[in-house]
Image: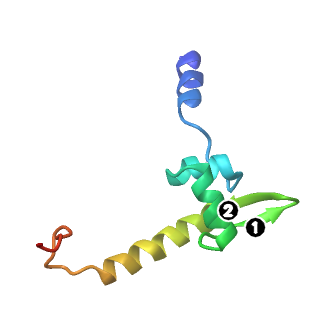
Amino acid sequence: MRSNALRSNLLVPEVREVMDIRQASDYLGISSDTLYKYASEGFVPAFKLGNRWRFKRSRLDEWMDRQSDQHAAEADPLQKKPVRPAF
């Protein structure tokens, strides 16, 4: 039984409150390069510890909630998918 518990813990990475760029990019589902660019531009909430970017999981969750709320408010409820203009 214990070996199954250990094995399942290995398959699910631990999500820490403060993450480095690799952990945060995995958490967000984007590349490390993209996240580094977003952090440098101030697009995502991040802070530097020394010369390394760090990300708080709770702040990223709040940011994602705001982003999804903003995009939901901007979306036209009658339009199901983007329509390309006819040429």
Question: Which one is in front, 10 or 47?
Answer: 47
Q: Mark 1 sits on what residue?
A: 47
Question: Which one is in front, 17 or 48?
Answer: 48
Instruction: Tell me where residue 3 appears, x and y as whole percent.
Output: 58, 16
Instruction: Tell me where residue 52 appears, x and y as whole percent.
Output: 80, 56
**Residue 74 vertical position relative to residue 33 in the rendered view, above or below:** below
**Residue 38 vertical position relative to residue 11 in the rendered view, above or below:** below
Residue at point 18%, 67% (across, down): 81
Question: Which one is in front, 74 or 15?
Answer: 74
Q: Considering only order in the chain, which callout, 2 or 1, is on the residue closer to the N terminus?
A: 1
Q: Are marks 1 and 2 in contact (CB under 8 Å)?
A: yes
Instruction: Tell me where residue 39 appears, x and y as whole percent.
Output: 66, 66
Dot 2: within a 10 Å radius of its alpha carbon, few (fewer than 14), some, or many (20 or more) residues? some
Residue at point 54%, 35% (across, down): 12
**Residue type marked 1:** Phe
Q: Quadrant of the C terminus?
A: bottom left
Instruction: Tell me where residue 10 appears, x and y as whole percent.
Output: 59, 28
In the image, taking residue 28 as reference, residue 23 lies left or right, namely right
- How was this image coloured? rainbow
Q: Number of callouts in the render?
A: 2
Q: Mark 2 sits on what residue?
A: 56
Dot 1: within a 10 Å radius of its alpha carbon, few (fewer than 14), some, or many (20 or more) residues? some
Residue at point 62%, 41% (across, down): 14
**Residue type marked 2:** Lys
User: Within the image, what quadrant is residue 37 found in?
Assistant: bottom right
Element type at marker 1?
Answer: strand
> Spatial distance from mark 1 to mark 2, Cα to Cα?
9 Å
Residue 7 image label = none
User: Within the image, what quadrant is residue 75 found in?
Assistant: bottom left
Element type at marker 2?
Answer: strand
Residue at point 56%, 46% (across, down): 26
